[in-house]
Image (cartoon, grey):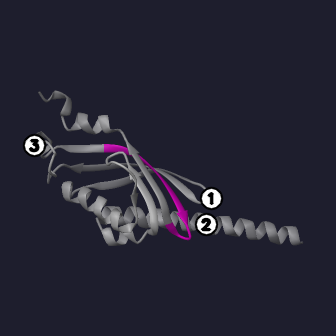
Amino acid sequence: MKTCITLFLTLFSFVASAQSIQQVTESHFAALNKHDVNLLAADYAPGAQFYSVSWEGLKVGPAEVKTAYSRYWKTSPDLVYKITKTIYGDNSVTIEYESTGTMTNLEGGSQAYMQGKKYTLKNITLIQIKNGKIIYDSTYFDQVSFLRQMDFFNQK
């Protein structure tokens, strides 16, 4: 009987954890698509680490989340994220998704030929979650594909 109770509690804990991870994932992508930096930052633990191939180094904490995503949404105000696949683990989720936008408001250092260019990127993000908050987030996409869509390789 004790073994059955232990098994039940373990299974219940796993199901509750999976639901929590799914809820965080859904909340995260809803905030991304609303372009709501406060809602997005609320998904992250205070010392959360996150990384993307689109910037140098590791970022830490919700304030850095706000800074990074504000830049994306300013540059591409029509940016949309669409999940294509999720793989849930005990305390993590791997998410494949597409992001689509237009380079509308170029940042300093961006080339003028990028202005008005549309892009679609296939991304993959690994998120680790503890106590219902993101503690680690690492995002990858094909930068060469982005540069092709920006017509980078045809510039002289």
Identity, as a three-letter code, of the amino acid under mark 2: Ser
Q: Which residues are magenta?
A: 121-133
Identity, as a three-letter code, of the amino acid under mark 3: Ala
Identify the residue at image location x=13%, y=42%. Answer: 111
Identify the residue at image location x=34%, y=55%. Answer: 81
Q: Is residue 41 left or right of residue 150?
A: right
User: Disc number at residue 112?
Assistant: 3
Q: Tell me if residue 98 is in the magenta stretch.
A: no
User: Disc number at residue 17?
Assistant: 2
Residue 23 in the image: state x and y as whole percent: 50, 67
Q: What secondary structure is the stretch in magenta mostly built from?
A: strand
Q: Compute the Cα span from label 3 to label 2.
A: 47 Å
Q: Which residue is mark 1?
A: 90
Instruction: Looking at this view, name the residue that lies furthest to the front.
Output: 57
Q: Compute the Cα span from label 1 to label 3.
A: 45 Å
Q: Is residue 91 left or right of residue 26?
A: right
